[in-house]
Amino acid sequence: MAKLNILRYPDPRLHTVAKPVAAVDERIRRLVDDMLETMYAAEGVGLAATQVDVHERVIVMDTSGERHSPLVLINPEIIARSTELAVAEEGCLSVPQIYDKVERHARVTVRALGRDGAPFDLEAEGLVAVCVQHEMDHLVGKVFVEYLSTLKRERIRTKMLKKTREELRR
Ligand code: GNR
Ligand code: NI
Protein backbone atom coordinates (compact mmCIF):
# COMPACT_ATOMS: atom_id res chain seq x y z
CA MET A 1 0.00 0.00 0.00
CA ALA A 2 1.06 3.56 -0.53
CA LYS A 3 -0.07 6.92 0.78
CA LEU A 4 -1.01 9.22 -2.10
CA ASN A 5 -0.66 13.00 -2.43
CA ILE A 6 -3.94 14.90 -1.98
CA LEU A 7 -4.49 17.80 -4.40
CA ARG A 8 -5.22 21.10 -2.72
CA TYR A 9 -7.76 23.72 -3.81
CA PRO A 10 -7.45 25.74 -6.08
CA ASP A 11 -5.56 23.11 -8.10
CA PRO A 12 -7.27 23.05 -11.54
CA ARG A 13 -6.98 19.23 -11.64
CA LEU A 14 -9.72 19.12 -8.96
CA HIS A 15 -12.15 20.21 -11.70
CA THR A 16 -11.50 17.18 -13.93
CA VAL A 17 -14.54 15.00 -14.69
CA ALA A 18 -13.79 11.34 -13.86
CA LYS A 19 -14.51 8.50 -16.29
CA PRO A 20 -16.34 5.29 -15.34
CA VAL A 21 -14.15 2.35 -14.30
CA ALA A 22 -14.16 -0.16 -17.16
CA ALA A 23 -13.28 -3.22 -15.04
CA VAL A 24 -12.67 -3.75 -11.32
CA ASP A 25 -9.28 -5.36 -11.75
CA GLU A 26 -6.01 -5.57 -9.80
CA ARG A 27 -5.10 -1.97 -10.73
CA ILE A 28 -8.40 -0.63 -9.34
CA ARG A 29 -8.12 -2.75 -6.17
CA ARG A 30 -4.63 -1.32 -5.61
CA LEU A 31 -5.98 2.22 -6.14
CA VAL A 32 -8.79 1.52 -3.62
CA ASP A 33 -6.30 0.22 -1.02
CA ASP A 34 -3.99 3.22 -1.53
CA MET A 35 -6.96 5.60 -1.23
CA LEU A 36 -8.07 3.93 2.02
CA GLU A 37 -4.56 4.23 3.45
CA THR A 38 -4.46 7.91 2.37
CA MET A 39 -7.93 8.66 3.83
CA TYR A 40 -7.14 7.01 7.18
CA ALA A 41 -3.75 8.76 7.42
CA ALA A 42 -5.43 12.11 6.76
CA GLU A 43 -8.26 11.30 9.22
CA GLY A 44 -10.92 11.99 6.60
CA VAL A 45 -14.34 10.33 6.41
CA GLY A 46 -14.16 10.05 2.63
CA LEU A 47 -11.88 10.42 -0.38
CA ALA A 48 -12.59 10.61 -4.11
CA ALA A 49 -10.04 9.46 -6.72
CA THR A 50 -10.11 12.98 -8.20
CA GLN A 51 -8.40 14.23 -5.03
CA VAL A 52 -5.40 11.97 -5.66
CA ASP A 53 -5.28 12.98 -9.35
CA VAL A 54 -6.82 9.75 -10.68
CA HIS A 55 -9.80 10.59 -12.86
CA GLU A 56 -11.89 7.45 -12.59
CA ARG A 57 -15.17 7.03 -10.64
CA VAL A 58 -13.84 5.59 -7.37
CA ILE A 59 -14.77 6.69 -3.82
CA VAL A 60 -13.74 5.37 -0.41
CA MET A 61 -15.50 6.30 2.83
CA ASP A 62 -15.54 5.43 6.52
CA THR A 63 -18.00 7.36 8.66
CA SER A 64 -17.67 4.99 11.65
CA GLY A 65 -16.15 6.35 14.83
CA GLU A 66 -13.84 3.33 15.14
CA ARG A 67 -12.51 3.76 11.56
CA HIS A 68 -12.78 0.04 10.85
CA SER A 69 -15.69 0.11 8.38
CA PRO A 70 -14.29 0.95 4.95
CA LEU A 71 -16.89 1.52 2.24
CA VAL A 72 -15.85 1.37 -1.43
CA LEU A 73 -18.02 2.80 -4.21
CA ILE A 74 -16.99 2.28 -7.83
CA ASN A 75 -19.07 3.88 -10.62
CA PRO A 76 -21.58 5.27 -8.07
CA GLU A 77 -24.91 6.62 -9.34
CA ILE A 78 -27.70 8.23 -7.32
CA ILE A 79 -30.85 6.23 -8.09
CA ALA A 80 -33.16 7.98 -5.61
CA ARG A 81 -33.05 11.20 -3.59
CA SER A 82 -35.34 12.79 -1.00
CA THR A 83 -37.01 16.07 -1.90
CA GLU A 84 -36.22 17.05 1.69
CA LEU A 85 -32.94 18.92 2.00
CA ALA A 86 -30.62 19.23 4.99
CA VAL A 87 -27.85 21.65 5.87
CA ALA A 88 -24.62 20.32 7.37
CA GLU A 89 -21.19 21.72 8.14
CA GLU A 90 -18.68 20.34 5.63
CA GLY A 91 -14.93 20.20 5.36
CA CYS A 92 -12.64 18.76 2.68
CA LEU A 93 -9.15 17.24 2.72
CA SER A 94 -8.45 19.33 -0.41
CA VAL A 95 -9.45 22.55 1.42
CA PRO A 96 -7.86 22.03 4.85
CA GLN A 97 -9.16 23.98 7.86
CA ILE A 98 -12.12 25.46 6.01
CA TYR A 99 -15.60 24.47 7.22
CA ASP A 100 -18.93 25.83 6.07
CA LYS A 101 -22.58 24.91 5.71
CA VAL A 102 -23.85 23.19 2.56
CA GLU A 103 -27.43 22.18 1.72
CA ARG A 104 -27.91 18.76 0.10
CA HIS A 105 -30.53 16.02 -0.21
CA ALA A 106 -31.30 14.64 3.26
CA ARG A 107 -31.39 11.02 1.96
CA VAL A 108 -29.99 9.39 -1.17
CA THR A 109 -29.87 5.86 -2.54
CA VAL A 110 -26.64 5.15 -4.41
CA ARG A 111 -25.98 2.15 -6.67
CA ALA A 112 -22.31 1.22 -7.03
CA LEU A 113 -19.84 -1.64 -7.40
CA GLY A 114 -17.83 -2.75 -4.39
CA ARG A 115 -14.14 -3.65 -4.21
CA ASP A 116 -15.11 -7.16 -5.38
CA GLY A 117 -16.85 -5.73 -8.47
CA ALA A 118 -20.30 -6.76 -7.24
CA PRO A 119 -23.17 -4.22 -7.40
CA PHE A 120 -24.92 -3.03 -4.24
CA ASP A 121 -27.28 -0.26 -3.17
CA LEU A 122 -26.49 2.12 -0.32
CA GLU A 123 -29.39 3.88 1.42
CA ALA A 124 -27.79 6.87 3.06
CA GLU A 125 -28.90 9.51 5.53
CA GLY A 126 -27.09 11.76 7.97
CA LEU A 127 -23.30 11.96 7.63
CA VAL A 128 -23.21 9.09 5.11
CA ALA A 129 -25.61 10.97 2.81
CA VAL A 130 -23.61 14.21 3.18
CA CYS A 131 -20.32 12.43 2.54
CA VAL A 132 -21.42 10.39 -0.49
CA GLN A 133 -22.87 13.51 -2.17
CA HIS A 134 -19.67 15.45 -1.35
CA GLU A 135 -17.53 12.63 -2.87
CA MET A 136 -19.72 12.27 -5.96
CA ASP A 137 -19.34 16.02 -6.54
CA HIS A 138 -15.53 15.54 -6.58
CA LEU A 139 -15.97 12.95 -9.37
CA VAL A 140 -17.64 15.59 -11.56
CA GLY A 141 -14.96 18.16 -10.69
CA LYS A 142 -16.92 20.03 -8.04
CA VAL A 143 -15.46 21.14 -4.68
CA PHE A 144 -17.83 22.09 -1.81
CA VAL A 145 -16.59 25.71 -1.76
CA GLU A 146 -18.39 26.15 -5.09
CA TYR A 147 -21.67 26.14 -3.10
CA LEU A 148 -20.47 29.16 -1.09
CA SER A 149 -20.73 32.81 -2.12
CA THR A 150 -18.19 34.20 -4.59
CA LEU A 151 -16.79 36.41 -1.81
CA LYS A 152 -16.22 33.45 0.55
CA ARG A 153 -14.76 31.33 -2.26
CA GLU A 154 -12.31 34.08 -3.28
CA ARG A 155 -11.21 34.51 0.35
CA ILE A 156 -10.65 30.75 0.63
CA ARG A 157 -8.71 30.67 -2.66
CA THR A 158 -6.41 33.48 -1.49
CA LYS A 159 -5.90 31.86 1.92
CA MET A 160 -5.07 28.46 0.36
CA LEU A 161 -2.59 29.95 -2.14
CA LYS A 162 -0.87 31.87 0.68
CA LYS A 163 -0.69 28.75 2.88
CA THR A 164 0.75 26.61 0.06
CA ARG A 165 3.32 29.35 -0.73
CA GLU A 166 4.37 29.58 2.93
CA GLU A 167 4.75 25.80 3.12
CA LEU A 168 6.97 25.83 0.03
CA ARG A 169 9.21 28.51 1.60
CA ARG A 170 9.85 26.39 4.73
O1 GNR B 1 -13.08 14.22 5.99
C1 GNR B 1 -14.06 14.79 5.51
N1 GNR B 1 -15.03 15.23 6.33
C2 GNR B 1 -16.26 15.71 5.89
C3 GNR B 1 -17.06 16.35 6.81
C4 GNR B 1 -18.28 16.84 6.45
C5 GNR B 1 -18.72 16.69 5.16
C6 GNR B 1 -17.92 16.07 4.21
C7 GNR B 1 -16.70 15.57 4.58
S1 GNR B 1 -15.73 14.76 3.41
C8 GNR B 1 -14.12 15.05 4.06
C9 GNR B 1 -13.08 14.27 3.29
C10 GNR B 1 -13.04 14.76 1.87
O2 GNR B 1 -12.55 15.79 1.52
N2 GNR B 1 -13.63 14.02 0.97
O3 GNR B 1 -13.69 14.41 -0.31
NI1 NI C 1 -13.64 16.57 -0.25
Image (spheres, grey):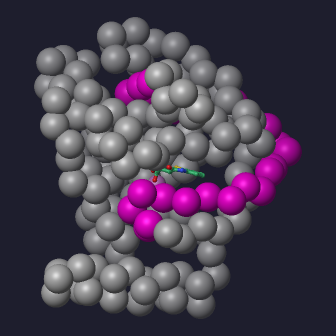
Residue 83 shows in the view: yes
| Residue found 54% across the figure and 23% down from its top | 111
Identify the residue at image location x=73%, y=38%: 126
Q: Which residues are magenta?
A: 70-96
Percent position of residue 27, x then y: 14, 25
Left or right of 142 in this view: 34: left
Instruction: Residue at 60% x, 22% y: name it.
Output: 122
Residue found farthest to the right: 84
Quick check: 70 left or right of 104? left
Question: With 155 as the anchor, is 140 left or right in this view?
Answer: left
- Residue 109 location, x and y as percent? 66, 27
Front residue (pair 71, 82): 71
**Image: 102 above or below 20:** below
Question: Residue 8 is drawn in which quadrant?
Answer: bottom left
Find residue 114 and report its horizontal and vertical position in percent: 40, 17
Quadrant of the rendered image containing residue 34: top left
**Quadrant holding the C terminus:** bottom left
Res 82 quadrant in image: top right
